[in-house]
Every structure is written in structure tokens, then in C-alpha cells.
Image: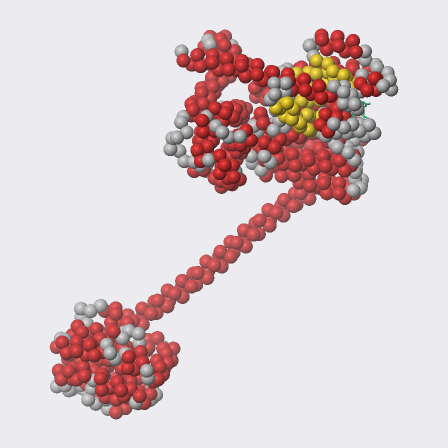
């Protein structure tokens, strides 16, 4: 096994209650397709894709699917380690999934402080097309997201709406962060040097 | 420990978990934090120290344990600075390109790693190779000396290794000699460094005595053994039990997982996990009929781990966690699978009746072995572990058998060699014995014979300077008459002549000795037979001219022809005359068929006895002589030679 074949620059972990559409989201993003009739289990567990950030630098995004099933709920924490970003999903047509959101976010914050959190309301198409009733009002979502300073996007894995945008914004912000970290570490190194000289 | 855990698992769990509340297990060594949080705390502490710059003050303020910890920290950062310095040295220093010589017992494996990356090094050039090996070597030395200190915790070693990867990564970007390499090549170089260093350090870093890894291994192994009744259904895992293809995939993923313990480099271990997990994904795809998601994958992995019960599972996981290059691998695909494996292990450790969705009594009955699941596939998988053990042992036995056979073969070869050696030695000894007695005995025996035969040998006068002269001339006229059959007369007089023969023989030798006093004795002794015969007919020219011809033949045929001439050369001037003629002799008899015959007969005699071998030609030669004259005459000749001896 050669590592350079599966190098990953940005680790993104996807969490959320059962059947909110995590796997579908990944499937949409990676393969640009959507399989409606597939049961709750579609997509790949791990996938990677190269994206180009706004600034033009390329980054490989590794996406970690997690199991939403309750019995493995406690295990999901293990996946947070070193994650640059986490997409916390809820189903806008399912109120209980919204209620679960808080616990996911607090857990994430607790375990992986530096991990950027993105809230993703899924199954937008169902509401747009009037197939299902929206159970979580958009204003409420926005308010909450603003309150905890987290970006929110509503996506549809069926139409692909906002899916690429979601991942693109993750890459952009991560690249931005990198440059900030690089600058600060440079400063730190300089400070160190100065100290060494004395 | 186990029962306690089972009874109040939930509470215990939180108790065992990291103080920070992350899902990793805390450790008393790390102050109740998990390794990661512990690290973080350390890093923070270091930063603080750097920021304040007043280290001593802080030490006084802080509690004892923390002071100690900081001291270590400082010591460590000192070392790091040194490490950096070492790295900063110019790459032109005359270090050897390969650090093999340094790494004692692992040299072979390290070389194998090196060979694996040969292609890379042929691309990046010798300078890069030298430099990277220098880095590896300095890291190796440092870590080895650190590891020798029992106070160094495995966690510190791990941090050092991770630092090494980071520093090396930075170095690859900064150093001149790495300029122009592609990022892929750089990654491969780092990968190589990791693999090389870890292969060499495996002995020290894997399941070290300072940790409780081994206990954990035993615990999880026991636990998995107790859980061998857990089926795919219990885990809500969609493994299709009817398909043989699925069965094969389950078995092969189990095999991959078991392979983890036999590799040494962390990335190789990770590779085993990856292959195992890919097989599981493939397997789940078969069962589910679509791409596998985490929801299918994790249960299947748990199932496989339960059925595989891999050796030293915890040690392996900890080793990879500690020493695998975190920045590269832990976020990649391998990292994903590895995290899933950790999840699976954690799930197994904390498994209760609730996690299997079954009534508590049933669970307990299963755990105590009161109920055994039915179903061939399940029982087959229960057997799996045993089968693997059997297979492992079989391979060990096979290996032992091979080695045994190799040893036996070597023993046989050695035996053959020894026998050969013995034969050779015996042959040489017997060769020597053939020659030596002939050389030594003559000196003594002449006296005996003298004492025996003075009555008969009452013929002192035959001192014959003239004879000597004649001898010189004899060869010539005789050679044409080689055809004469007389020498062929069989050995019937042999017995009668035994004594006589001795006489002649001895006298000849003595004569030879006399003449060859300063010549090489060995050379002489080897050809005693021929010399003797030559001497013999030399001394008896008038009575037996034809018989001696044949004698001459034999001499000429024998490869040691020159030797008989030598004595002549050394003795006196008339001999030289002969020797000059003698050189021409060989060509003449070679054409005659008789010579061959005689040789054959000589060979025949050879077989008859070793000791007599030397005498045989003499005997034979004497036979005709004896025929015509008698033993007396020969004795006279002997005496004559003796007289010559004394004269000389
Ligand atoms: N219409 C529509 N359906 C969706 C969308 N996303 C997911 N679904 C459906 O929701 C169901 C669950 O989707 P999954 O992707 O399996 O959900 P999950 O979060 O991975 O579920 P678990 O893995 O079981 O936790 C599937 O039947 C999908 O077809 C969406 O954007 N639009
Ligand atoms: Mg899923």
C-alpha cells in the first residue's frame, strides 16, 4: 500500500440521525447521482474527491460516512479525530432529526474543538415539490445557526441543489484557515528564533 | 475485572473514558486523559512555558507531578532541538548512504524495505538517499537511547516519532537536495522513512513492557472468545449466510485482518486493515446490492473482528495509533477503516445485551455458555478461530519440517564429506606408508641382511668400477631387444626369491641412497621401485643382458622416468653420460606393445598388496635374471652395491 494513493488533505465527517440522508449526500457529491429506491443504505463508507478552492489550490477531500443507527451512536465520536470539518445533517421534513442536531454539535465541539461545523438541512426537494411538509422552519434554523456561528445550507441529494456549494465552502474555508495558520506559525517560528539568539 | 465491567458497564465506561469526555479511553499514565487529550495538554503546557519564558518560577509554583512533567517536557524539547540540529547538518558529510550497519537484528528486514523502494531511489538520486538515511539514522539512535531509559513513556516515544515525521516533512520542503522532487516522491520518501525506521524499531515500540497493552490484548481476546456466539443477525448485519461467495469473502477478510499481526511497519498494518475492510465493503455490496454505507460496514466489521479474534489486537491498534504518520494516514481511507476498527473493538469491549437487542437472560446464558447457537454457518465461524490456530500451527510445523529436512540434508552432506575426508586421508596415509617404510627400512635392514648372509656373500672382490662404466652403455644395446619374452615368465620363482628380492631391493636402495645422499629423498623414495630395478640391471650387466631390458621398459613407462636418472647425475661423471643417453630412452619403448602389457601386469600386482607393490617390479625383473643365473648372483650384486655404498 502506498500512502500517496490515498492522501487526503481535508477530512470531513458527516453525522446526523438515522435516515436523514447522510449517505445520499455523499453519494450525490461523489458520484453525482441519486438513487431514490435504494434502501437506507446507499453510498460508500469512505470516499475522496479533489476540489479546487477559490484561491486555486487543489485539495483532496476525504469524506467519512458514519452510522446513524442508535446502537453505534456512541462510536461515532471516534470519527471526529483530526476532522477539519463536520457536516451535521438533519431532515427538514423530520422534526426529531432537528432535535438531535444539538447533541451532535455539542459532542463535536467537545471532542474536536477545531473542527468546523456545517449544518445541512436535507431533502429540500421534498419540500420544494410539496411532496412532504416542512417540519423545521427555515427561520428557526437560521437563527440557531447564527447563534452558534455555524454555516447552514439546505440541500437536496435528489436534485443536487447546494451539494457542491456545501463542499466548496468547506474547502474554501479550510484553505483560508491553512494560510492563517501558516502565517501565525511563521511568526511563532520567528519568535522562537529571536529567543534562541538571546 | 470483566465481570465487574459487565455488571455496571455504563458507569464504568464513563469512568474509563478520557476526562475530556471524548470517546477515547483515559489512562492513569496520562492523568486520566486519553492519549490525544494528553498530548494536547502537553502542547498547551509547552506553549505556556515558552510564552512565559520563566520556567523555574513555574516549576516552583506548580504541583510536584506537573513540575516533573514539565521537566521531562523541557528535556524533550532540548532533544528535539538537538534532533533539528542534526538534521541541519550539511548533507555532504561522509556518511554512508545506507544506515543498515547500524540496525542490528533487523538489518535483513530493513534491507528488504530498502529494496522495495529501490525504484524511488533510482529516481531521486544518491544525494537524497544519503540525506534521508542520515535523518533516519539520527532518529533511530535518538529513539533507541530514549527507549532505553525506563522513565520514557511510550507516549513520549510516540510524540517523538510524530515529530520526526513532521520535521522530515518540513525538511523535504526546505533542504536544497530535495528541491525538484514531486510531492508524490516526497510523500514516498516520508513513507519510506517511516517504514524503515519503524521496521527497525518494531522490537522496542510494539507492545512495550512499560504499557498494559499485553493485558488488554489478553482481555479482548478472552472477551471475543466469550462472544463467539454472536451472529450476524444479532448485529443487524446484512451478511447473507447462504451465498458461498459471501462466505469466501468473510474468510478472506478474516485472513487479512489476522495478517496485521505479522507485519511490522505501521503502514503495513494499516494496509492489512484496509484490505480487510475493502473486502468487507465488497462483501456488503454483494449482500446489500449497492454501494456500502457506514451503516452496513461497521456491523460487518464488528462481525469479522469477532470471528477473527486477531492476535494482539490492542497492541496492534495502539502501535498504529502511536507510530503511524498521523498527518498522512489517519485522515485517509486507511484512517477511516482504522477508526472503524477502533469502533468495532470499542463496541466489543462495551457490548451488552442492549447493544445486541436481546433479553438480558438470554445474553447471560449465551455468555455463560449455557446456550449455543445453532446453524452450520455460525458454528463454522465459531470453529473459525480454532481452524486458524490449527492453520497457523500447521504452517509453523511445515516450516519446522522444512528446516529439519534442511538440517538433515546438511548432516548427510557433512557425513559424506567426512567419509570422503577419511578415505582421502587413509589413501594418503597408505600412500605415505607405501613409501616411507621403503625409505626407512633399508637403512636398518641392510645391516640385518649383512649379518645373515656373510657366509654366502663371501665374495668381496666384485668391486667393479668397470661395471659402472658398462652400466652406462647398457641401455642402448638393450632397448631394441625389449621384445624378448623372458620377463613375462610368471612369478613362480617369487616365493623362492623373496629373500633375494629383499636383498636386491635393499641394496638398490642403499645404493640409491648412497648416490643420492644430497638429493631429495622424497623424490627418490617415490620411485624406489624403478630406481631399484634400474640399479639392479646396472649392476648385473654381463650375466643377464636380455632380461634386464624388460626392466628398463617398466621404468620408462612409469611416469617418474627422470628420477632414475637423477642418482646417476649426482653420483659421478660416467653417470652423466648415461643420463644424457637416458633422456632418449623413453621414446624407444613406448612403441612396443610389451610395455603396455607389463604395465598391466604391474597394475595387477598393485592390487595384490600394497607393501609388496614396490617389490613387485623388482621381483619380476629379477625373475628372468634368476632364471638364468641364481639368487646368489643377485646377492653378489647387492653386496657389490653395498660395497659401492661404503666406497662412496
Ligand atoms: N427526496 C429526497 N430523498 C432523500 C434525500 N436524501 C436522502 N433521501 C432519502 O432518505 C432515505 C435515507 O437516506 P440515507 O442517505 O440512507 O440516510 P442516512 O443518513 O445515510 O441513514 P443512515 O445511514 O441509516 O443513518 C433514502 O431513502 C433516501 O432516498 C433528498 O435530498 N431528497
Ligand atoms: Mg447512511
Residue at 45% x, 29% y is B177
Q: Quadrant of the N terminus of chain B?
A: top right
In the displayed structure, does residue B428 sit left or right of residue B159?
left
Where residue A136 appears, as percent x and y from the top left, is: 81, 13
Question: How has the structure been colored for display?
Answer: secondary structure
Looking at the picture, tell me which residue is in the foreground, B463 or B64: B463
Q: Is residue A159 visible?
A: yes
Please say if B284 is above or below B558. Answer: above
Looking at the picture, tell me which residue is in the foreground, A42 or B448: A42
How many numbered dots are placed on residues in this image?
A: 0
Residue at 30% x, 89% y is B484
Residue at 63% x, 26% y is A60
Where residue B623 appears, as percent x and y from the top left, is: 29, 87
Please say if B588 is above or below B386. Answer: below
In the displayed structure, does residue A117 sit left or right of residue A98?
left
Tell me where residue B576 sits by quadrant: bottom left
Tell me where residue A167 sits by quadrant: top right
Where residue B269 appears, as percent x and y from the top left, is: 60, 34
Tell me where residue B284 sits by quadrant: top right
Looking at the picture, tell me which residue is in the foreground, B132 or B17: B132
Residue at far bottom of view: B628
Q: Quadrant of the C terminus of chain B?
A: bottom left
Residue at 40% x, 27% y is B90
Amino acid at each position: 500500500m502506498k500512502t500517496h494513493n490515498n492522501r487526503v488533505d481535508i477530512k470531513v465527517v458527516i453525522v446526523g440521525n438515522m435516515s436523514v440522508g447522510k449517505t445520499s449526500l455523499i453519494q450525490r457529491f461523489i458520484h453525482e447521482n441519486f438513487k431514490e429506491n435504494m434502501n437506507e443504505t446507499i453510498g460508500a463508507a469512505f470516499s475522496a474527491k479533489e476540489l479546487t478552492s477559490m484561491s486555486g489550490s487543489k485539495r483532496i477531500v476525504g469524506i467519512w460516512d458514519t452510522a446513524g443507527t442508535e446502537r453505534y451512536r456512541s462510536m461515532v465520536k471516534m470519527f471526529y479525530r483530526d476532522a477539519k470539518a463536520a457536516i451535521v445533517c438533519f431532515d427538514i421534513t423530520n422534526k426529531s432529526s432537528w432535535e438531535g442536531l444539538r447533541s451532535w454539535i455539542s459532542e463535536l465541539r467537545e471532542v474536536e474543538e477545531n473542527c468546523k461545523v456545517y449544518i445541512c438541512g436535507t431533502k429540500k426537494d421534498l419540500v420544494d415539490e410539496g411532496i412532504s411538509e416542512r417540519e423545521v422552519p427555515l427561520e428557526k434554523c437560521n437563527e440557531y445557526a447564527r447563534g452558534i456561528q455555524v454555516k447552514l445550507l439546505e440541500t437536496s441529494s435528489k436534485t443536487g441543489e447546494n451539494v457542491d456549494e456545501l463542499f466548496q465552502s468547506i474547502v474554501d474555508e479550510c484553505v483560508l484557515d491553512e494560510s492563517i495558520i501558516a502565517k501565525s506559525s511563521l511568526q511563532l517560528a520567528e519568535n522562537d528564533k529571536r529567543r534562541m539568539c538571546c | 475485572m470483566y465481570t465487574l465491567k459487565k455488571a455496571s458497564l455504563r458507569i464504568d465506561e464513563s469512568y474509563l473514558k478520557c476526562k475530556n469526555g471524548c470517546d477515547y479511553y483515559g489512562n492513569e499514565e496520562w492523568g486520566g486523559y486519553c492519549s490525544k487529550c494528553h498530548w494536547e495538554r502537553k502542547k498547551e503546557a509547552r506553549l505556556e512555558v515558552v510564552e512565559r519564558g520563566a520556567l523555574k518560577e513555574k516549576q516552583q509554583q506548580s504541583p510536584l507531578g506537573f513540575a516533573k512533567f514539565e521537566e521531562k517536557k523541557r528535556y524533550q524539547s532540548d532533544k528535539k532541538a538537538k534532533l533539528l540540529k542534526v538534521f541541519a547538518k550539511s548533507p555532504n558529510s561522509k556518511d554512508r548512504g545506507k544506515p543498515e550497519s547500524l540496525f542490528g537484528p533487523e538489518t535483513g528486514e530493513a534491507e528488504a524495505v530498502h529494496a522495495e523502494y529501490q525504484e524511488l531511489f533510482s529516481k531521486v538520486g544518491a544525494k537524497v538517499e544519503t540525506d534521508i538515511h542520515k535523518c533516519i539514522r539520527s532518529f533511530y539512535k535518538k529513539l533507541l537511547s530514549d527507549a532505553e531509559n525506563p522513565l520514557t513513556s511510550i507516549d513520549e516515544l510516540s510524540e517523538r516519532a510524530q515529530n520526526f515525521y513532521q520535521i522530515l516533512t518540513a525538511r523535504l520542503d526546505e533542504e536544497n537536495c530535495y528541491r525538484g522532487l514531486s510531492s508524490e516522491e516526497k510523500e514516498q520518501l516520508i513513507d519510506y522513512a517511516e517504514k524503515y525506521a519503524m521496521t527497525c524499531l518494531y522490537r522496542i515500540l510494539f507492545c512495550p513492557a512499560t504499557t498494559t497493552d499485553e493485558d488488554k490484548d489478553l482481555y479482548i481476546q478472552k472477551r471475543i472468545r466469550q462472544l463467539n456466539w454472536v451472529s450476524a443477525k444479532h448485529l443487524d448485519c446484512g451478511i447473507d449466510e447462504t451465498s458461498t461467495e459471501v462466505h469466501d469473502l468473510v474468510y478472506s477478510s478474516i485472513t487479512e485482518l489476522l495478517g496485521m499481526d505479522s507485519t511490522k511497519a505501521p503502514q503495513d498494518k494499516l494496509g492489512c486493515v484496509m484490505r480487510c475492510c475493502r473486502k468487507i465493503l465488497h462483501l456488503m455490496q454483494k449482500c446489500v446490492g449497492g454501494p456500502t454505507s457506514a451503516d452496513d460496514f461497521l456491523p460487518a466489521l464488528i462481525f469479522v473482528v469477532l470471528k477473527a479474534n486477531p492476535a494482539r489486537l490492542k497492541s496492534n491498534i495502539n502501535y498504529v495509533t502511536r507510530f503511524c504518520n498521523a498527518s498522512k494516514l489517519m485522515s485517509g481511507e486507511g484512517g477511516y477503516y482504522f477508526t472503524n476498527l477502533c469502533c468495532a473493538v470499542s463496541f466489543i469491549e462495551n457490548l451488552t445485551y442492549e447493544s445486541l437487542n436481546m433479553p438480558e437472560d438470554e445474553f447471560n446464558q449465551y455468555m455463560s455458555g449455557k446456550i449455543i447457537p445453532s446453524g452450520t454457518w455460525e458454528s463454522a465461524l465459531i470453529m473459525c478461530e480454532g481452524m486458524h490456530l490449527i492453520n497457523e500451527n500447521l504452517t509453523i510445523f511445515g516450516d519446522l519440517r522444512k528446516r529439519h529436512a534442511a538440517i538433515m540434508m546438511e548432516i548427510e552432506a557433512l557425513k559424506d564429506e567426512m567419509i570422503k575426508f577419511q578415505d582421502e586421508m587413509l589413501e594418503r596415509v597408505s600412500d605415505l606408508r607405501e613409501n616411507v617404510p621403503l625409505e626407512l627400512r633399508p637403512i636398518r635392514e641392510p645391516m640385518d641382511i649383512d649379518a645373515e648372509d656373510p657366509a654366502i656373500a663371501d665374495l668381496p672382490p666384485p668391486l667393479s668400477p668397470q661395471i659402472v662404466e658398462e652400466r652406462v652403455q647398457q641401455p642402448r644395446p638393450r632397448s631394441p631387444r625389449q621384445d624378448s619374452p623372458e620377463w613375462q615368465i610368471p612369478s613362480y620363482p617369487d616365493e623362492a626369491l623373496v629373500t633375494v628380492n629383499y636383498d636386491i631391493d635393499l641394496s638398490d636402495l642403499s645404493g640409491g641412497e648412497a648416490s643420492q645422499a644430497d638429493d631429495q629423498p622424497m623424490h627418490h623414495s617415490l620411485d624406489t621401485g624403478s630406481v631399484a630395478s634400474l640399479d639392479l640391471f646396472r649392476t648385473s650387466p654381463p650375466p643377464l643382458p636380455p632380461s634386464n631390458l624388460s626392466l628398463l621398459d617398466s621404468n620408462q613407462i612409469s611416469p617418474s622416468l627422470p628420477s632414475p636418472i637423477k642418482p646417476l647425475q649426482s653420483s659421478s661423471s660416467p653417470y652423466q653420460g648415461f643420463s644424457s643417453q637416458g633422456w632418449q630412452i623413453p621414446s624407444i619403448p613406448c612403441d612396443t606393445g610389451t610395455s603396455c602389457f607389463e604395465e598391466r601386469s604391474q597394475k595387477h600386482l598393485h592390487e595384490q598388496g600394497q607393501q609388496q607393490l614396490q617389490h613387485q617390479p623388482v621381483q619380476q625383473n629379477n625373475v628372468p635374471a634368476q632364471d638364468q643365473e641364481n639368487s646368489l648372483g643377485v646377492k653378489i650384486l647387492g653386496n657389490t652395491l653395498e660395497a659401492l655404498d661404503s666406497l662412496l
